[in-house]
Amino acid sequence: MSGLSDSAVFGWAAVAVVLAQAVTALIARRLGRVSVVDVTWGLGFVLIALVCALGGDGTGWRRLVLLGLVGFWGLRLAWHISVKHRSHSGDDPRYAELIGKPLDQGGLAIAIRKVFLIQGLSMLLVSLPVFAGMLLPVRWPLVVALGLVVWLVGVIFEIVGDAQLAAYKRLKDRPPVLETGLWAWTRHPNYFGDACMWWGLWLIGGFASGWAPAVVTVIGPIAMTYFLAFATGARLLEKSMMARPGYPEYAARTPMFIPRPPARIR
């Protein structure tokens, strides 16, 4: 498969996304839960990276690096969300409100149009730096190294933030709001970590390929950051969190997304 034209690689990646979304839609109908699409979000990026790694003819070592980084991110995210879903019954209220009717009573067609199609197109858009890195030669290796540093910062925020949240939930007499560790720096360290990882992938795949690829593919991390901070991530979660005792006060002294040292450090 290696050495396909750029358009062919993109086409096969799009086919992989369509098939993944189609299978997810069937599973969603069977389970009566649109939220299974959240698991496919991470897996879809892994499929795209795998297709591009096999079909692209860019610099070999960078293709392997990108496949490893995207694979780690996507598989970990899919596992994390699947575990979260197993601990909850019923569909995500966001999707229930968006669809408005059960999947087996006409809701599936609405879900395909409003959720599965939009998510599939978003995967292809966000993956533009991955396409560039898989199809083009490396022009600036030092930028790849910088991207790896940014990606690792994102991994630290995401993994440590998730671990601190899990430890907080295990406390019997826990305070109403988690505001220690990374959660004292930002109200959503895991979402910030996700965004950081995709800016790192842009540096590795887009920017390191040259100025033109950098400009064309920067929409990828911008879109991912928008999703995480304002569309379906932090901003949406804030609506329910603000009703929790102590959270408005916590929000007043802690940035929502981009970390800032807590007052006692500043």
Image: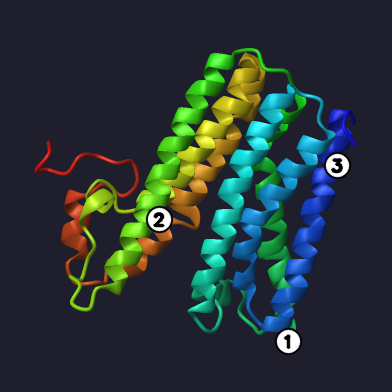
Secondary structure of the residue carrying tag 2 is helix
Query: Residue 18: x percent and y percent?
Result: 80, 56
Q: What's the amino acid at mark 2? A: Ala
Q: Quadrant of the C terminus?
A: top left
Kind of residue at badge 3: Gly
Q: Which residue is mark 1?
A: 105
The image quarter containing residue 124 is top right
Could you tell me which residue is drawn at 59 percent across and 71 percent down? 35
10 Å crowding of disc 1: few (<14), some (14-19), many (20+): few
Closer to the chain start, of discs 1 and 3, is 3
Query: Residue at label 2?
Result: 234
> Which quarter of the rendering shows the N terminus?
top right
Depth order, front residue of 146/21: 146
Q: How is the image coloured?
A: rainbow
What residue is shown with label 3?
Answer: 11
On the image, the x and y values in percent for residue 207 come to: 59, 21
Q: Assess whether mark 3 and mark 1 are in contact (beta carbons under 8 angstroms).
A: no
Horizontal side of 1 relative to 63 (left or right) equals: right
Between the C-alphas of marks 2 and 3, the distance is: 32 Å
Q: Residue furthest left?
A: 264
Measure the alpha-carbon separation of dots 2 and 1.
31 Å
Q: Is residue 103 visible?
A: no
- What distance separates the C-alpha of mark 1 from that of mark 3? 33 Å
Give the amino acid type for the residue marked by disc 1 in the picture. Answer: Gln
Marked residue nearer the N-terminal end (2 or 3): 3
First of labels 2, 1 by sequence position: 1
Residue 29 occupies which quadrant of the picture? Answer: bottom right
Asked if residue 1 lies left or right of residue 52, the reply is: right
Q: In front: 252, or 86? A: 86
The answer to whether residue 219 of the structure is visible from this angle is yes
